[in-house]
Every structure is written in structure tokens, then in C-alpha cells.
Image (cartoon, rainbow, N blue to C red):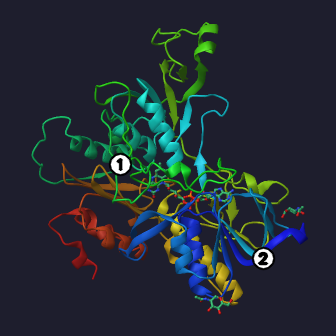
């Protein structure tokens, strides 16, 4: 095998998503004369543009799909290899690509992302959405569809259900409100009227209330009937370009491309076979029990909810006892890290969620192998205000940190865990409202030992603060609240806020003055 090695690089990075590209950039900036290789399955990479540091940890940026040549022009000592990695021999420090070439590395960073968790792998008519190809496949199937079943309650399901027209949507969520990954039901309640379903009411005066944890029932009882829209800043993306399939797809084209981000549906007309506009019914607190094809349905004695046996190609039985026939099922129930090509013959420690476990230097359990982004699981002892979520922000932060750590090792410099891992932060847009999430924004892992402060102005803003022992540990800010920087500070300073009480959210008190 050794004799077949094409070239040995100082650094090899696998994957052209945000994590891989950021890692490559960081390495190339830090060590311009080092040989760096980026091995990726797709012909395009994801680039971060318009990066803006909003506060100490909060950041905002756009994501653009670009041809790989853009990177190569920027970094002359970078080689881009367009073929997916098929095998990793971690002991010998070698990778083999699908086109049969073997490359050596001194240090490797795996940034191969994740793919949608499918409800089932052995059934046709079940789709997951991950990259431009799967989004196109979805669009194609949708043009012939009269009814689809969407399963899942994260950002992708939210967008999808809102965007699809001309096709009935049955939406199965395991929670008692929609959008649970990002919102509590209180935030959901704020967003719903903005959908313009009914006559808009005038903005009511600011209401402030303090809720203890019992107030969970105040929110949990809410069942949201309408649908959110989940969009974001403009994304330059080649989804709709007709020659997408003909470009640079070598052998092994079943490898996934980069994950789409927000606005993935832009340029895609998500329209079903029927004329009617949006028709969505939500099935709450249920999961999928089984999926049958039409034949299996006919052969079974199962009584269908719709009594239309044989009419649909596929049937979904939910745990609430109902069965729905449909044209296809969209599985939007989260992601699984893309680890398979790397596991065979190697000794990686995997986390419970299937990710490659990394330490605070982004190092896996294999020597000289790092990992970043959706493929990895943060295995260090987290700051109490941070949690991993497989989002763009974290893919960038991890790729950057991995690149820094790899370069630092060459330069024999010491490096600490980056400050951005002190506090969870995410900026996005839901239904055209700016949304800022900080820390334990949904009181994750706090048990019942916390208090919530809410400020709610209809159609304008929703502010939620999570307090524990008088200290702010999390916040949700929807709308132009202008509070993100101050709140970030208050959280990071761990200041006791007891004496300020509800004034913290009093719109007539400029809290910035308090804390200067
Ligand atoms: C539809 C959708 C909507 C989303 N919306 C949002 C959102 O609104 N906000 C947000 O923050 N996040 C969102 N996300 C999540 C976000 O896209 C991911 O967290 C992020 O893209 C992860 O980046 P990554 O670099 O780790 O992986 P990816 O972007 O998945 O990139 C992985 C790369 O590895 C390559 N690869 C895979 N296997 C191999 C192999 N064997 N050999 C070589 N290369 C390989 C792929 O081609 C790809 O280039 C969304 C995801 C989806 C699918
Ligand atoms: C590329 O590497 C060579 C040495 O390997 C170095 O001389 C050159 O300056 C590097 N190029 C850039 C743009 O840094
Ligand atoms: C794999 O890792 C475990 C724990 O680190 C170690 O005990 C074992 O010897 C390793 N096996 C190989 C083949 O390297």
C-alpha cells in the first residue's frame, strides 16, 4: 500500500461544509507554507461570508455555495481532491478515496457532516432532506403528490410544512406544540398571530409577568394550530441551477453533499399536484409506529383511519392509533453523524448520538485525527451555559478551533478552549422575526430550579429570561429587542440580579444604564 501513496500532506481535511472549509482556511492562514489537502465529495464548498461578531460570543454570517476553485485561488498551497474518502487507515495515517488514490497525512480533520435520520431504510417513499440533491428529489416527488406525511419537529420540518403548497400535509410531532427544538410554546404563541391567519389586533401594551416553573402548564397547555415560517438572510445557492447534476460528479456519487442551511427551499418551487393552497393538519404527541406499502396494507387486517386501502402507495401508522395513506413520507427527525467510512478497522470512541467523540482540542480517540462540525460530539466537560446543537454557528466555531489547535501543535503553542464555547448562542430568523437564543434558552437541564421572566408585546417582541438562583442563565429574544449584547453580558458576568427584579424587563427602564 505504501508504494501507491500519491502524496503525503501535512494536513488533510475531509469535507467541504462549513466546518471543513473553516478548518482549511484557518490552517492555511496560520501556516501558509504547509501542504493542505481538502478532500470532499461534492463539487462545491460552503463558504462563510459577511461574518459579523455581534457581541462577545454572538455572531452572524451568511453562507454561500461556491466552486472549490475559489478556495484554491485564495490558498496556493491548498490541494482540493474531488472524491469521497472510502477508507481510513488511522494507524498508517492514510486515506483512500473512491477513485482509488491513497494519500498520507500527518494530521487529519474529519468534517464529514451528518445525514438525515431516516425512519426506515428499507422502504421506498421515505425521503430525508439534507443537500441540494435530496431537496431536488423532494421537489420532483412533490409535483405528483396529493398528500404527504411530515415527521419531526425541528427547523427543517417547520420550514417544509409552511412552504409546501398544493398538497395536503399531515404533520406528526412528538411534542404537544410545534417547533419544540427552538421554542417553548409561549414563543410559539407569540409567533402564530403574525401568520395573518386572522385579523391583526393592535399591539397591546407591554405585559410583564413573572412565572415560576408551575407556569410550564401555562405554556404546555397551548396547542398551536398554525404554522411557522423559518427563513433567514439571503443565501446564494445553486439549488435551482439546471446543470447541477452534470457538474463534477465522479464515481461514488452517493456520498452526501454539504448540508443545506436556512433558505434551502429558495429557488425550489415546493408545489404539489393539487391547486389548493396550504392544508396542514398536525398530529400531536405521536411518533411513527410502522410504515406499510400499499401491498402490505392490502395483505394486513389493519383498519385504516382513512379507509382508503389501496389508494395510496404508502401508509403511516402513528402511535396515536391513526393511520394515514400518502404519496410519500418526509423524515425530518434529526441527523446522524457521517462516520461510517472511518470506523472500519479503526478505534474511534463514539458518543451516544453516534458522533466521533472529541476532546477540548477537537482530537478524537485516534492519534493525530481531529474532527469538527456535525460529525463530532463535544466530549469535553461543557461550560454550564453551553450545549452542542448541530447548527452552522457551531460548525464554523468547531472548524476554526480545530484548525487553530492543529496549527498550534505544529508551532508548539498552547491553546485553550475557545471563548465561544462558554455560552451557547445562535441568531436566526423565524417568520421574519429576528431570533436570538442564549445559554439555556429553554431551561435545558435545569430541572425545576429556575424562574422565567417574560415580556410579550403582541406582534412586536417576545422576551424570555431564564433565571437560576438570581442569575441569568438563558434568554430567547424575538423581534428587534436590542437586548442581545446586554443580556449576553449579564449571563457571562453571572451577576446576581435579584435586586432588579422585574425591572430587568421593564421597557421603561434602560437596563444598560444599570450595568455600566
Ligand atoms: C435542510 C436543512 C436546514 C438547516 N437549517 C439550519 C439553520 O437554519 N440554521 C443553522 O444554523 N443550521 C441549519 N442546518 C444545519 C447546518 O446545515 C449544519 O449544522 C452544518 O451545515 C454542518 O456543517 P458541517 O461542515 O459539519 O457538515 P456539512 O455541511 O454536512 O458538510 C459535510 C461535507 O462533508 C462531505 N463528505 C461527507 N462524507 C464524505 C466522505 N466520505 N469523503 C469526503 N467528503 C465527505 C460532504 O460532501 C460535505 O461537503 C440545516 C440543515 C439542513 C439539512
Ligand atoms: C507555499 O509553500 C511554499 C513552501 O512550501 C512557500 O515558499 C510559499 O510561500 C507558500 N505560498 C504562500 C502563498 O504562502
Ligand atoms: C482501542 O482503544 C482502547 C481504549 O483506548 C485500547 O484499550 C485498545 O488497545 C485499542 N485497540 C487498538 C486496536 O488500538
- Residue at image point 55% right, 62% down: 17
The residue closer to the viewer here, 12 or 116, is 12
Compared across the picture, whether 324 is left or right of 77 comes to left
Q: Is residue 448 left or right of residue 83?
A: left
- Of labels 2 and 1, earlier in sequence is 2
Q: Does the image show residue 172? A: no
**72 on left or right of 263:** right
Where the N terminus falls, by quadrant? Answer: bottom right
Q: Secondary structure at mark 1?
A: loop
Which of labels 2 and 1 is toward the front?
A: 2
User: 84 or 515, which is in the foreground?
Assistant: 84
Provide the secondary structure element on which disc 2 rests: strand
CB at mark 2 closer than 8 A to ligand 2? Answer: no
Residue hosting label 1:
230
Does residue 288 sit above or below 99 in this rendering?
Answer: above
Distance between the alpha carbons at the discs numbered 2 and 1: 44 Å
Could you say which quadrant of the image residue 484 lies in? bottom left
Q: Position of residue 506 (x, y in %)?
A: 20, 63
User: Would you say 293 lies left or right of 306 here?
Assistant: right
Q: Nearer the viewer, residue 99 or 359?
A: 99
Q: Is residue 370 above or below residue 466?
A: below
Q: Is mark 1 within 8 Å of ligand 1?
A: yes
**Residue 501 makes an appearance in the image:** yes
Q: Which mark is residue 8?
A: 2
Where residue 472 sits in the image (x, y, percent)? 38, 65
Q: Find ligand 3 in the image and state its quadrant.
A: bottom right
Amino acid at each position: 500500500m505504501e508504494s501507491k501513496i500519491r502524496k503525503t500532506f501535512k494536513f488533510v481535511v475531509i469535507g467541504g461544509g462549513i466546518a471543513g472549509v473553516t478548518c482549511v482556511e484557518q490552517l492555511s492562514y496560520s501556516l501558509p507554507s504547509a501542504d493542505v489537502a481538502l478532500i470532499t465529495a461534492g463539487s462545491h464548498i460552503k463558504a462563510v461570508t459577511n461574518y459579523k461578531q455581534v457581541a462577545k460570543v454572538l455572531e452572524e454570517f451568511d453562507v454561500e455555495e461556491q466552486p472549490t476553485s475559489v478556495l484554491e485561488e485564495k490558498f496556493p498551497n491548498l490541494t482540493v481532491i474531488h472524491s469521497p474518502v472510502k477508507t481510513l487507515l488511522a494507524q498508517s495515517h492514510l486515506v483512500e478515496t473512491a477513485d482509488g488514490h491513497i494519500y498520507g497525512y500527518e494530521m487529519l480533520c474529519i468534517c464529514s457532516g451528518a445525514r438525515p435520520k431516516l425512519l426506515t431504510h428499507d422502504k421506498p417513499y421515505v425521503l430525508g432532506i439534507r443537500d441540494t440533491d435530496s431537496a431536488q428529489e423532494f421537489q420532483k416527488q412533490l409535483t405528483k403528490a396529493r398528500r404527504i406525511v411530515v415527521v419531526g419537529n425541528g427547523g427543517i420540518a417547520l420550514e417544509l410544512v409552511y412552504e409546501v403548497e398544493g398538497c395536503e400535509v399531515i404533520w406528526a410531532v412528538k411534542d404537544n406544540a410545534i417547533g419544540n427544538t427552538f421554542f417553548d410554546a409561549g414563543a410559539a404563541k407569540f409567533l402564530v398571530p403574525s401568520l395573518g391567519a386572522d385579523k391583526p389586533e393592535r399591539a397591546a401594551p407591554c405585559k410583564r409577568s413573572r412565572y415560576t416553573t408551575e407556569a410550564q402548564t401555562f405554556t404546555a397547555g397551548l396547542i398551536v394550530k398554525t404554522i411557522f415560517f423559518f427563513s433567514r438572510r439571503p443565501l446564494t445557492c445553486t439549488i435551482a441551477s439546471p446543470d447541477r447534476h452534470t457538474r463534477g460528479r465522479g464515481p461514488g456519487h452517493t456520498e452526501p453533499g454539504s448540508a443545506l442551511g436556512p433558505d434551502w427551499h429558495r429557488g425550489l418551487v415546493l408545489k404539489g399536484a393539487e391547486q389548493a393552497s396550504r392544508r396542514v393538519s398536525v398530529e400531536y404527541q405521536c411518533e411513527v409506529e410502522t410504515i406499510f406499502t400499499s401491498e402490505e396494507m392490502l395483505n394486513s387486517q389493519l383498519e385504516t383511519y382513512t379507509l382508503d386501502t389501496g389508494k395510496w402507495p404508502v401508509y403511516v401508522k402513528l402511535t396515536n392509533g391513526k393511520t394515514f395513506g400518502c404519496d410519500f413520507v418526509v423524515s425530518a427527525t434529526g441527523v446522524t453523524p457521517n462516520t461510517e467510512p472511518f470506523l472500519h478497522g479503526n478505534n474511534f470512541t463514539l458518543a451516544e448520538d453516534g458522533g466521533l467523540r472529541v476532546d477540548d482540542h477537537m482530537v478524537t480517540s485516534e492519534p493525530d485525527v481531529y474532527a469538527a462540525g456535525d460529525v463530532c460530539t463535544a466530549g469535553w466537560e461543557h461550560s454550564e451555559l453551553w450545549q452542542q446543537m448541530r447548527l452552522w454557528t457551531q460548525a464554523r466555531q468547531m472548524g476554526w478551533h480545530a484548525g487553530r489547535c492543529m496549527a498550534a501543535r505544529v508551532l508548539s503553542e498552547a491553546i485553550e478552549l475557545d471563548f465561544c464555547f462558554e455560552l451557547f448562542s445562535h441568531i436566526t430568523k423565524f417568520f421574519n422575526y429576528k431570533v436570538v437564543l442564549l445559554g439555556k434558552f429553554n431551561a435545558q437541564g435545569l430541572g425545576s430550579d429556575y424562574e422565567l421572566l417574560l415580556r410579550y408585546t403582541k406582534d412586536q417582541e417576545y422576551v424570555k429570561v431564564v433565571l437560576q438562583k438570581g442569575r441569568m442563565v438563558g434568554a430567547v429574544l424575538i423581534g428587534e429587542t436590542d437586548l442581545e449584547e446586554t443580556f449576553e453580558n449579564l449571563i457571562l458576568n453571572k451577576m446576581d440580579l435579584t435586586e432588579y427584579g422585574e425591572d430587568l424587563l421593564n421597557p421603561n427602564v434602560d437596563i444598560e444604564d444599570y450595568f455600566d
